[in-house]
Amino acid sequence: MKNRIISSLGIAAAMAFLVGCNEINFGGMLDLASPVTFANQNRAIVTINPGQFQTKASIGKSGSNKEITLEIKNADQPTKVKISFDKNINIGETFDLAPAQIGQNFGLKGTMKTAVANSADQSGWESCSYQRPETVCRSLKSNEAAASKTLSSDLGQDEIGSRQAPSVPGPVAVHTPDFNGQPPHVPNCHTQWVTVWGNQTVTYHYQTTTRDLSASFVQGDKTLGTYTGKSTETEKIYTYQGQCY
């Protein structure tokens, strides 16, 4: 196995909002000073009355749109609303989405601050696996060997080649469970691939990305309410992986 180097994300890459298809999940609080009416994706109208509510927010992609999903704990069963906007609308550290862009009667304005912290490098051993070809043989009597040879002739060399496992460097084990090499028995062999488990040395560190989201629901010059939330994600980053054996 070749050594693999995985570079850690830079601050600039981490601050790019909604890159790729990864979903970002926040936990936080929705604080409404005025009623807010959402036009949900299924065209249902949902109105949330003033108050403070624990709210989960997730931001991701669905088809050609980006989506903000809110799960608002304003009742025994949380109220779920979705806000969609075009995938080409990029949001950075600050954002200002107009009502027409998100299909609502309010706009969204706010900030999302991102911080990335890396732990110290650590080294150790971890389990691993790789594929190895093994040649397996069994004995055939003379008449079985003749039938096998006839079948091989009928199939042709091209088709036989297509059924053989690719040749790779490495050890090949030969098993002859019932072949003693004495006539009238002849060996019939084929190659099969097996999974071999082993260990390898690794060097890695943990990367923690923290995002603080603050958004305001605005109608003209009026602020209807705010949402504040935090997202924390930790990823194990490998900087070295030794040979698996």
Image (cartoon, helix red, strand yellow):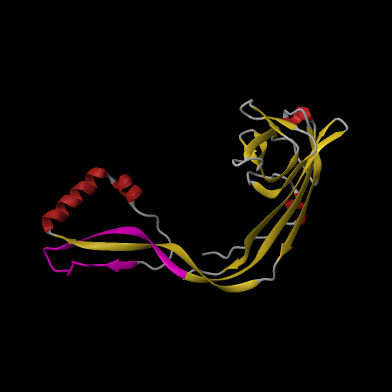
**Secondary structure predominantly adopted by residues drawn in magenta:** strand
Say if 134 sits above or below 225 in the image: below
Q: Is residue 8 visible?
A: no
Q: Residue at x 16, y 55 (%)?
A: 145
- Location of residue 57 (image quadrant): top right
182 drawn magenta: yes
The outermost residue toward the top is: 43
Q: Residue at x 43, y 67 (%)?
A: 197
Residue nearer the viewer, 170 or 223: 223
Percent coordinates x, y for residue 72 in the rendering: 66, 41
- Location of residue 34 (image quadrant): top right
Which region shows up in magenta?
A: 173-198
Q: Residue at x 18, y 48 (%)?
A: 150
The outermost residue toward the bottom is: 124
The outermost residue toward the right is: 221
**117 left or right, relative to 137:** right
161 drawn magenta: no
Q: Residue at x 37, y 54 (%)?
A: 165
Q: Is residue 145 visible?
A: yes
- Location of residue 6 (image quadrant): bottom right
Residue nearer the viewer, 244 or 128: 128
Percent coordinates x, y for residue 170 in the rendering: 42, 66
Percent coordinates x, y for residue 146 in the rendering: 15, 53
Percent coordinates x, y for residue 169 in the rendering: 43, 64
**126 left or right, relative to 85:** left
Say if 18 sits above or below 230 in the image: above
Residue nearer the viewer, 14 or 40: 40
**Total marks placed:** 0
